[in-house]
Image (cartoon, grey):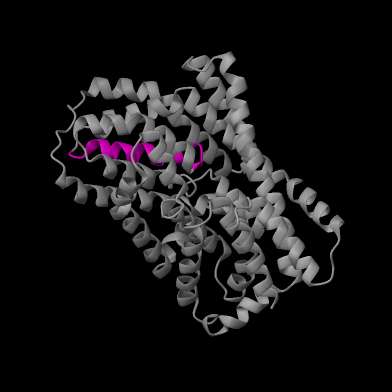
Amino acid sequence: MTLLVFIASLLGAMAIGVPVAFALMFCGVTLMWYMGMFNSQIIAQNMIAGADTFTLLAIPFFVLAGELMNSGGLSRRIIDFAIACVGHIRGGLGIVAIMAAVIMASISGSAAADTAALAAILIPMMAKAGYNVPRSAGLIASGGIIAPVIPPSMAFIVFGVAANVSITQLFMAGIVPGILMGLALVVAWQITVRKDNVKPLAKTSGGERLRATGRAAWALGMPIIILGGIKAGVVTPTEAAVIAAAYAMFVGMVIYRELKPRDLPHVILQAAKTTAIIMFLVCAALVSSWLITAANIPGEITRYIEPLIDRPMLLMFVIMLLVLLVGTALDLTPTILILTPVLMPIIKQAGIDPVYFGVMFIMNCCIGLITPPVGVVLNVVSGVGRVPLGKVVTGITPFLLAQVAILMLLVIFPQIVTVPAQWLR
């Protein structure tokens, strides 16, 4: 009955249009009332304790780094570098989009921000070159969701805090799956682009490639500094976020000189708004998380899926299907915060590596960002690229299937994630 109260109160609140953060708080209050332990101090204490975490300081700085990167010209130079390298290949602009998405993912960790930057620059270029516009928009949206998988990732930070899993290990474990997602998009794009009668861009000379590399060198150095520092144990993920923001500001203002002092208030305000939304969600979710544990909801769910506990692969398939269904209706952060405290006790009981599960969970949540009916990233690429949402949904189908295929591959062969992750640790 407790499980029914939890689901009904949460879904009921969201169904009538209550924002997710307030729906989580309402769900917590309802559970407290049902268990006869209502106390407003529990709500306040859990919300304050939820925000008072050193690890979560990484979120505002990574958000700020992403905003500074887009405003300071780093994103555009990464795209120019990709064009110089692979723009001349058949379907080259699509490969440029994927290559730029992977590079930018290793800098900002925000699916929406990366997608917006790529869509604004590449969709007009691809339309002018004769590419199918809805398919191009679908490709860019699919590339954008690689950002939360390749470190640094705000999604891994939120999951690590909610699940009490090492964020550094999550970062290292996300590298190979993120690259595989990019390679799957390349294969799907090369198959589908044959339908478009397009002329490749002119091949750049060695000198032009060298100059493009030189112009992008400062931007390309950012992921090396972030991941190198974390892997070497010189900095924590939180300290790496601070360095990333300071580096992006320095490069944008001093090296590229596209970021002006008058732009900083707007950039900081945008970063603050995004951070406030994420942090309020985290605080509200930790109230529900505490009550989920107190009400032993994971124990109730375990009773339903007890036959699968001894069959980890089948259990992962079932959980991935559940997460995918939830992810089609919710944004990334709420999905993480709602399901993590429910699923982690089951994962531990089944003997599944929490780091491996975290990577799979985040990948699945990211796929939900490009899956109707909500599809947050779909809406971003539709708005920025001025492509009707219905056409984007049609264009994204082959790339969505490619990403789901990679997810299923990693469920069947978990060693693809766990072995490189152990080596990188």
Position of residue 414 in the picture relative to residue 65 (left or right): left
- The residues colored magenta run 90-110
At a point 45% along the width and 26% down the height, the residue shown is 74
Q: Is residue 238 visible?
A: no
Q: Main secondary structure of the magenta part?
A: helix
Please identify the quarter of the rendering in which residue 203 is found. Answer: top left
Q: Does the magenta portion include 95? A: yes
Position in image of residue 342 (x %, y %): 63, 67
Position in image of residue 171 (x %, y %): 54, 49
Position in image of residue 388 (x %, y %): 34, 42
Q: Is residue 48 visible?
A: yes
Viewer-closest of 275 and 99: 275
Q: Does the magenta portion include 105? A: yes
At a point 35% along the width and 35% down the height, the residue shown is 386
Q: Is residue 198 above or below residue 156?
A: above
Please identify the quarter of the rendering in which residue 353 is found. Answer: bottom right
Q: Is residue 301 above or below residue 248?
A: below
Q: Is residue 243 above or below residue 396?
A: above
